[in-house]
Image (spheres, rainbow, N blue to C red):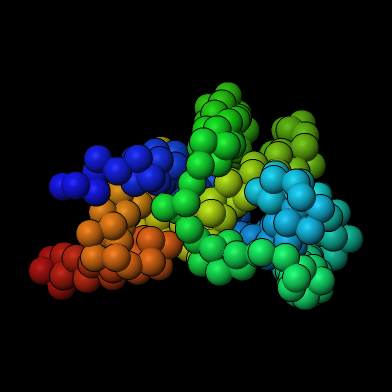
């Protein structure tokens, strides 16, 4: 197909493939720890950083990344403050992120700010700086997970046991939040702030349907994420659809098919 020869589409594929690895990987840890909404929170905070980046003339994704990392520390701090109501931290930070983003975008009305591109994604406009950013984030995430997989596994399934065994729980909680912030900031231009949490959570939801172990879950989320990203980009390129929305709807379709297959297998047995 002609579109495969296009440089902008090749960049989109490279960026999509990289995010198709890291976002689902981080998502499986968040979903298993019942923190799936943290994706929405950090993405909204990132958008506030993007808006500030436009206002001060600094690479928007980099400013969004800084905002997301700072927000991840605040979330962890509030989670410790409201131990019984840990979800409050996510709600508070999300509200603050949305409020700040709205104010900054209002201040930037006189500037050429492509709001829709960051809200809904604009993967076909990825440039070399974006690809380098995504590649660096991918390497950081993969190295962190590869070297700390056992510790993350214990923390994910039994945080109290991890603390008793001497694991620095606070450090690993912050690490997961920071890695998630990095992935979300890098993903914003691909699927958009309003859809990025789907790339974190839906592959994880799919893996929980078919995987029988944690290791299988880790492998399954990556396969499903890559399948949806590559197929979604191809469909969006050929039929001129919104890439982010196409990827997310494809993920939902995969999940529904898996649910139907599982139900059919149960009825058959």
Q: Residue at x 51, y 67 (%)?
A: 120
Q: Give the tally of numbered discs.
A: 0
Q: Position of residue 233 (x, y in %)?
A: 32, 54
Q: Answer left or right for 128 relative to 210.
A: right
Q: Answer left or right for 252 relative to 264.
A: right
Q: Answer left or right for 220 relative to 238.
A: right
Task: Name the quarter where the C terminus is drawn.
Answer: bottom left
The answer to whether residue 258 is visible is no
Q: In the image shown, does 250 or 86 lie closer to the viewer?
A: 250
Q: In the image shown, does 99 or 59 lie closer to the viewer?
A: 59
Q: Residue at x 56, y 69 (%)?
A: 116
Q: Position of residue 88 (x, y in %)?
A: 78, 71
Q: Does 257 sit above or below residue 172?
A: below
Q: Position of residue 59 (x, y in %)?
A: 69, 45
Quarter occupied by residue 143: top right
Q: Does 209 sit above or below residue 102?
A: above
Residue extending farthest to the left is 268
Q: In the image shown, does 56 or 51 lie closer to the viewer?
A: 56
Q: Answer left or right for 63 relative to 135.
A: right
The answer to whether residue 62 is visible is yes
Residue extending farthest to the right is 81
Quarter occupied by residue 55: bottom right
Quarter occupied by residue 129: top right
Q: Residue at x 51, y 42 (%)?
A: 127
Q: Position of residue 74 (x, y in %)?
A: 83, 55
């Amino acid at each position: 197909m002609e579109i495969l020869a296009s440089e902008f589409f090749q960049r989109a594929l490279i960026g999509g493939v990289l995010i198709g690895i890291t976002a689902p990987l981080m998502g499986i840890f968040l979903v298993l720890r019942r923190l799936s909404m943290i994706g929405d929170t950090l993405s909204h905070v990132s958008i506030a950083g993007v808006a500030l980046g436009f206002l001060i003339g600094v690479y928007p994704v980099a400013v969004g990344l800084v905002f997301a990392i700072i927000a991840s520390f605040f979330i962890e701090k509030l989670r410790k403050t409201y131990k019984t109501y840990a979800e409050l931290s996510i709600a508070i930070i999300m509200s603050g992120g949305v409020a700040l983003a709205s104010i900054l975008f209002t201040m930037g009305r006189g500037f050429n700010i492509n709001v829709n591109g960051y809200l809904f994604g604009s993967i076909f406009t990825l440039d070399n700086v974006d690809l380098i950013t995504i590649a660096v984030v991918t390497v950081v995430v993969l190295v962190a997970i590869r070297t700390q997989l056992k510790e993350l596994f214990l923390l994910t399934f039994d945080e109290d046991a991890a603390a008793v065994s001497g694991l620095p729980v606070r450090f690993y909680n912050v690490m997961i939040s920071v890695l998630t912030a990095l992935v979300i900031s890098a993903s914003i231009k691909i699927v958009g702030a309003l859809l990025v949490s789907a790339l974190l959570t839906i592959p994880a939801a799919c893996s929980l349907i078919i995987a029988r172990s944690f290791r299988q879950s880790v492998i399954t989320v990556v396969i499903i994420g890559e399948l949806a990203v590559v197929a979604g980009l191809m469909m969006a390129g050929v039929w001129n659809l919104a890439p982010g929305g196409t990827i997310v709807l494809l993920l939902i379709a995969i999940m529904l098919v898996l649910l139907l297959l599982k139900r059919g297998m149960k009825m058959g047995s």
